[in-house]
Amino acid sequence: MSNLKAQLGLPGRLDVARLREDFPILSQTVHGRPLVYLDNGASAQKPEAVIEAERRCYREYYANIHRGVHYLSQTSTTEYEAARGKVQRFLNAASDKEIVFTRGTTESINLVAHSYVRPRLRAGDEILVSAMEHHSNIVPWQLLCEETGAVLKVIPISEAGEIDLDAFAELLGERTRLLSVVHVSNALGTVNPVAEMIRQAHAKGIPVLLDGAQAVPHMPVDVQALGADFYAFSAHKLYGPTGVGVLYGKYDLLKAMRPYQGGGDMIKTVSFEKTIYADPPNRFEAGTPNIAGVIALGAAVDYLSEVGLEAIAAYEQELLDYATERLSAIPGLRIIGTAPNKAGVISFVMDGAHPHDIGTLLDEQGVAVRAGHHCAEPVMRRYAVPATARASFGLYNTREEVDVLVAAIEKVRELFGA
Ligand code: C6P
């Protein structure tokens, strides 16, 4: 169905009831209530196709890759490299050589920090991030700054949770060596105007890394149309397995970069006198990778392509609008992050109830949300809250589940006498 719709260029509607059947974990009860899983920002559940791809790999053709002449190794290698091609098409990268498999967004960002930025960074140089970054797009840069005397600069955000574009334009300076910014905020849900930000950075010759961890599950991403130099994401938020991630990098940049780690499978030749590194992407994939995980990521990408990212985006927008409307009507509840352009996330606080208590009480009613700082402590500080409760949506969530969330929040209000 989605193939036809994609051919016709229509986003189409999701048959969510049907899609839910693809996710075995969703049909259970928790504390005697039907599970309402609204913690997709932390990690999404896996469809049967992903579970089965990993299982098939281990049952039918598993062996180490790139090393064996035997049948199993060659089959594993073919499947692993096929996943690279799937991710290339998923991101519309120019070549599969621009797709590096990592352990996740965190490792992808650290790879860029060490292999691209570190050798080019001098005391007084600047790295530019926004005030809504996840810790994994803050701490790697602080480590580099400590080492080199470079400076981390921060683009402020508005009360609604939008990047201050005037401040951004001023902060893009002579000494800026990298703009590293989140595509969609995990704590606020804001979709940042990254294409425009990249345009402005490139006009000053500044390369750009996008943290796409919370973007790829919710919208089609075209790295060439965006012009991103680097793009990082994790498989586990994309309905794929844990322990696998992707770093997209423009080939010329990857080609000019030092390896991240040394080891097997990242070299052309090794001698004690001199080692010649393999070309990208192998240069950045030292050691035995998560073979079955990468293959399962390929299955996740197939699954999402079949369902259709446009249709997912359209459906989730409707769901987000509905949830925003319903939550906004709850007295004493404040949504943190009210940008007009949001995806998949509602962070909120309530008068008289700590977010951790909200999380625990919702769990008792079968509703899984995340409570905490969401590894974005500077965001919490910006809004002067210790933490938030966060409902984050996936393609299988429904309006009825939003109603259950709202009813559960009403119970919290009653309990706390708000
Ligand atoms: N955010 C959340 O609950 P890893 O852990 O490497 O797969 O992803 C890190 C990461 C990076 N950037 C953004 C925008 C993210 O949201 C995350 C992970 C989870 O919001 C876990 S803290």
Image: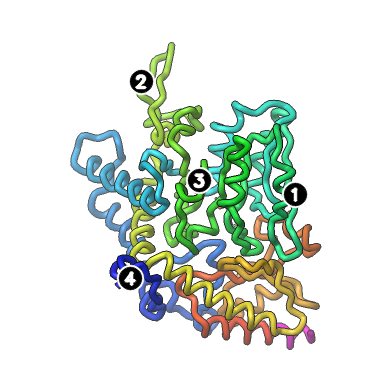
Q: CA distance from mark 4 to mark 1?
A: 42 Å
Name the kind of residue labelled 2 in the image. Thr
**Percent position of residue 342, x then y:** 60, 66
Query: Foreground mark, 2 or 3?
Result: 3
Whether pointer 3 and pointer 1 mark residues with C-beta atoms closer than 8 Å, the reply is no
Mark 4, residue position = 5
Q: CA distance from mark 2 to mark 4?
A: 49 Å
**Percent position of residue 141, x then y:** 66, 39
Dot 1 beta carbon under 8 Å from ligand 1: no
Identify the disc placed on residue 167: 1
Q: CA distance from mark 4 to mark 3?
A: 27 Å
Q: CA distance from mark 2 to mark 1?
A: 48 Å
Say which quadrant the N terminus sits in: bottom left
Depicted 378 relative to depicted 310: above or below: above
- Left or right: 7, with 112 as reference point: left
Dot 2 beta carbon under 8 Å from ligand 1: no
Mark 3, residue position = 227
* Nearest to N terminus: mark 2 or mark 4: 4
Magenta span of residues: 412-418
Mark 3: which secondary structure?
A: loop
Identify the disc placed on residue 344: none
Name the kind of residue labelled 1 in the image. Ala
154 vs 371, nearest the viewer: 154
Q: Residue at x 36, y 41 (%)?
A: 95
Identify the disc placed on residue 269: 2
Q: CA distance from mark 2 to mark 3?
A: 34 Å
